[in-house]
Image: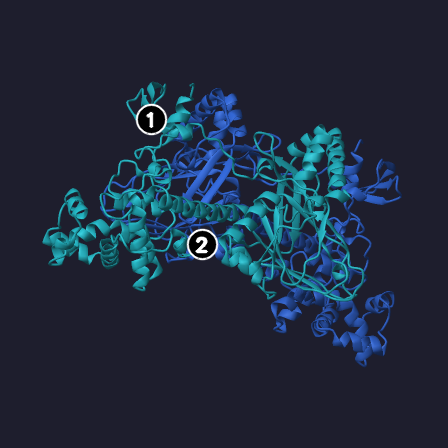
Chain colours: A blue, B cyan
Amino acid sequence: MSLSPYWLRDNCPCVECRDPRNGQKLFRVGDLPDGLAVAESVEDGDALAVLWSDGHRSRYPLAWLAGTDEGDGRTEDGKRLWTAADFGPGLPAADWSAYLGDERERAAVLAAVRRSGFALLRGVPAVERQVLEVARSFGYVRETNYGELFDVRVEPDPTNLAFTGAAIAPHTDNPYRDPVPTLQLLHCLRSDAIGGDSGLVDGFTAAALLREESPADFAVLTRTPVPFVFRDRRTELRADRPLIDVDGRGRIREVRFNNRSIATLRGLTTAELDAFYAAYRRFAAITLRPELQLTFRLAPGDCLVFDNTRLLHARTAFETGEGHRHLQGCYADLDSLASHHAVLERRTAALDTLEQLFEGEGAGEYLGEAVTLAGHMLQAGALAEAAGAPAHLVAAALLHDVGHFHGSGLRLMQGEDNRHSHTGADWLGRWFGPDVTEPIRLHVAAKRYLCTAEPGYRAKLSEASEYTLQVQGGPMTEEQAAQFAARPGARDAVAVRRWDEQAKDPDLETPPFAHFRPLLAELMA
Amino acid sequence: MSLSPYWLRDNCPCVECRDPRNGQKLFRVGDLPDGLAVAESVEDGDALAVLWSDGHRSRYPLAWLAGTDEGDGRTEDGKRLWTAADFGPGLPAADWSAYLGDERERAAVLAAVRRSGFALLRGVPAVERQVLEVARSFGYVRETNYGELFDVRVEPDPTNLAFTGAAIAPHTDNPYRDPVPTLQLLHCLRSDAIGGDSGLVDGFTAAALLREESPADFAVLTRTPVPFVFRDRRTELRADRPLIDVDGRGRIREVRFNNRSIATLRGLTTAELDAFYAAYRRFAAITLRPELQLTFRLAPGDCLVFDNTRLLHARTAFETGEGHRHLQGCYADLDSLASHHAVLERRTAALDTLEQLFEGEGAGEYLGEAVTLAGHMLQAGALAEAAGAPAHLVAAALLHDVGHFHGSGLRLMQGEDNRHSHTGADWLGRWFGPDVTEPIRLHVAAKRYLCTAEPGYRAKLSEASEYTLQVQGGPMTEEQAAQFAARPGARDAVAVRRWDEQAKDPDLETPPFAHFRPLLAELMA
C-alpha cells in the first residue's frame, strides 16, 4: 500500500493532532518536518498503526483509509440535473407545518434544494415578512441594497408601464454581487391576476448541454470574466464573473445569466468578442428550449426556495391589467442550508445508531448484573419518566451508560479515555447540550459522592457496583464530597445515579428505545 | 476599424435598447437576429453612427469606443500587493469621527480596504456591538453560525487552556463557508494584556511569490479543490475550494488558508497528493516569511477592517496570564463596500462636474437675460437660502436650470429629450432624491401654472421668459392648472419658480458654487 506521507500525517486522528470535539487540527502543516516518512507500518486489528520517522505514532482505522467522499455537493457531481419532464409526477414540495414539525420532512425539503435546486413550501402564512421566517428556519437572511426583503408586485396601473406585467426571461438574480446571494426565496401573498406564472430552468442542465453540443463554446464561457453591473442612486455594484464557473477539476459549479446587467466587455480582441458572443447566444438559446422550461403557478401561501447559482427563474406575461400579484422575496445562502440539512441527517443517523446499539450489543450481558445493558438503561429512562423528570434528565438516565458500548459509532471516539462516563458524555456532546451530557459525565462521581455523603447508601450497592466502585476510586473524601456537592450539575447527577441504582430489576417491563426517540430528537434540536 | 458586431450591438446606448436611468438592457441577447452585421457606419461628429443589417440605428460616442476598463478590482490587477516594509510610514488609518463626517476621508478608508486589503479606524467608541455600526456604515453584516458578532477574549484563567493566549498562525476565517465572508472587522474593546499583537500577511503577495518561485506548485494549488470543514453540535459546514483561486484569465482572485479546518483530500492519486502537499507546504512557508508579517497592536477603540479573501490574520502569543484582551468581530462583504466607495467617488465627481459647469460654461450668456446662467442659478440658490428654505429647496433652486448645460456630463444623458426641466431632473436623479429633482422637473410647468392661476404674474415675466413660455406650451388651461395644483410637489415647484423669476438681477452679489457644496454633499448622502 503506497500512501502519500504528508497526506497521511496531516490526517492523524490522535488527540495530540486533533481536537476530539470539533475535529480541527492542532498543528500547522509547516510544523511537520521536511523529509517526513513512514518508518514502520503494520495492520493491527482494524487499524493501520504507523511509526513515523520523527517518532510520532498514528493509528488509522482501515475503514477510514478505504473511505470515499461525496464532496461539498456544490458542483454538478452533487446534483440531479433535470428537464421539465422529470417533474411530471409533481414538484418537490412540503406543507409548512409538516416542515416545521417533522425533521424528516424538513430534511427532505432541504435535500431537494441541494439536489434539484429548489423546493416549494405550501401553506406558509400569507402575511408580510413571513418569507424572512422561512429563511431563518434553515439559515440567515442576506441583506442587500434591496433591503432585508423585496416586493414584487404587479398591479392594474396603466400609468406605470413597468408594472404592466411583461414576461421576464429566465435569469439569475444579483449577478453583479460578489459573493452573489446563493439562495433566493419567493413567497406568494396574493395572486389573482391572469398570467404571471413562474418558470424555472436548470442552468446546470443548460450548461451541460452546451458542453455536449459545443465544447469550445462551453470553454469560452468558463474562461471569460463578464462584467455584470448595477447602478442606481445609492448603488454601484460590479462583478466580473464567467457565465459558467467550473471548479479546478472542470465541474460546473455556478451559472450567472442576466442579459440586462451585462456591461461592456473590454480588453478582448475582435475575434475573442465574436467567439464570446457566439457562445453566449448559443447558451442563451439553450436556456429557452421548451423542454427545459418548468412552469407552475404560485398560489398565496406558496414559498419557492431555489438555488440562485444554478436555477434561472422567469415569469410569464400577464394577459390583462386585471387582478394583482404580490410576492415577497429575500436572499440567503446555500452553505447554511446545507449545514442545517447535514445536522438533521446526522441527528437521524445518531438516533439510528443508538437504536441499533440498544437492540444489538445492548441486549447482551451487562457486567454481571441480572439485566442486560439495554434493559438497565431503558429501566433508568423509564424510572425517570415515571418520576416526572424533565426531558433532559429522562435522556440522561436513558443514555447514562452509552460509554459502555463498543459499537462502531463509539469506538472511534474512545481514544485513550477508558472512563465510560466521560466517553459517553463526550460522544453525546456531538448532539446534546450539557443539560444532558453533564449528569452523565458525573454519574460515576455521584456514586462515589453518595457513598460518603449518605449513610447506608454503600450498603445497598449491587455486588457488581461495589466491585466497580473500587476500580473507580472508591468513596470520596469528605473534602471531595463537599466540592462535588457545590458543582452546578451535582443535583442532576445524583438524580440520574439513583435511577441507575434502581434500574437493575430483572422483572421490570420497559418500553422499547423507539418510545424515547421523539424526546431525544426534540432535545437535539 | 474592425468591431465585433454582436458586441457592438449589445452595447447600443439608445433609449430603445437601454433604460436611461439604470443603464440596464431592455432586450435579450437572443432577440438579436442571426447574421447581424453593420450595413453602414460613419463617423458623425464625436460619434460613430451605425446602420445595422436589421434596420436598427445606433450612435456610439468615439470616447466610449476608445474606452478602457479597470475591472471589478477584485483580482490582483486591482490591488497594491505589499510587504510589511511598505507600511513603514504608517498604516492606512483614519479617525472614526472624520470617517463619519467627511466623505473624502471615508472614501480614502474604503479605497485602502479595496487596494491594500485593510484599513484601521481609530477612536471608534469602545462599547459592545459598536462593530456592527462600523460594518453598517458601508454595507451589511453577514450573520453566521457564530452569530451577528463574535467575541475574542483572552482572560487570566489558568483552568481553561484555550484562553491562555497561544499564538495563532496567519489564516483566513471561515474557509468552510461558501460564499466565504469577504470582509472581517475586529474592534478592540480592551487590551491590557502583555503580548497579543495583531498580524496581517498579504496572501496575494504570498501567492504571487509562489507563482514566481515555483509556477508548477502555484498551478497545483489553483486547480485542487480542498475540503474545508467545520463541525459542532449545530453546524456542519463544508466547502471544497482551492487555496488559491484564479479567474478565467489566470489572475489571483481569492486565497483561503487555514490548516485547522482542512479535512481529508480524497480522490487523488498518491502522486497528486504528494504534489499537493509539497506545494501547500511551500506556500505555507512563504506566508511565514518575516518580511511579509505586518505586526501592530490594537488599542481600545481601534477597529480593523480587512479583506478575508486576501489577507491572512494572526495573533502573537501572550507572555503572561496577566491582563485582558477583548475584541468583538463581525463579517461583512466587499461588494457593498466597493459599491459604497464607488458611490462616494461618483458623488465627488458629480460635484466637481457641477462646479466646473458653473465656473466654465455657466459663466456665458443665458438666453438673452442680463445675468449669466451660473449667476442666475446662484442667485436663485442664494434667494432660497436667505428665505430660510429647507436644504432640498435651496439645492433645487440652485440647480433648477442644469438642463441648459451642454457639458460632457450631461450631453450623454440628454438623448431625445430636449425639455430642460426633465433633462436636468433626470440627470440629477442619479445623485439626489425626488425632494430635489421633482421641483426642478415641475419648474417650467409651475410657470405655465402661475400664468393661469395668479392674476398679474404673466405681466412680470422677463422678455426672454415670455418668449420661452410660448415654446413651452403657453399658460395652462383652468383644468390643467387645477390638476397641477393637486400634485404633491406643486408647492415646492412654485417656490422654486418664484426664486427663478427673481434671480435675474445683474447687480446682485452671490456666493460661489463652493459655498453650496457641503449642502449638496449632505443631500446626496
User: Of helix, strand and loop, which one carries label 1?
Assistant: loop
Q: Position of residue A344 (x, y in %)?
A: 58, 52
Above or below, A471 relative to B105: below
* Quadrant housing the N terminus of chain A: top right
Same subunit, labels 1 and 2: the answer reads: no
- Residue that numbered label 2 is attached to: A148
Label 2 is found on which chain of the structure?
Answer: A
As drawn, is B474 to the left or to the right of A148? Answer: left
* Quadrant housing the C terminus of chain A: bottom right
Q: Residue at x 67, y 41 (%)?
A: B82
Q: Crowding at label 1, few (<14), some or many (≥20) Cα neighbours within 10 Å? A: few
The mark found on residue A339 in the picture is none
The label nearer to you, 1 versus 2, is 1
The reply to whether residue B46 is visible in this rendering is: yes
Q: Position of residue B488 (x, y in %)?
A: 24, 58
Above or below, B116 relative to B277: below
Q: CA distance from mark 1 to mark 2?
A: 47 Å
As drawn, is B77 to the left or to the right of A92? Answer: right
Q: Amino acid at mark 1?
A: Gly
Q: Amino acid at mark 2?
A: Glu
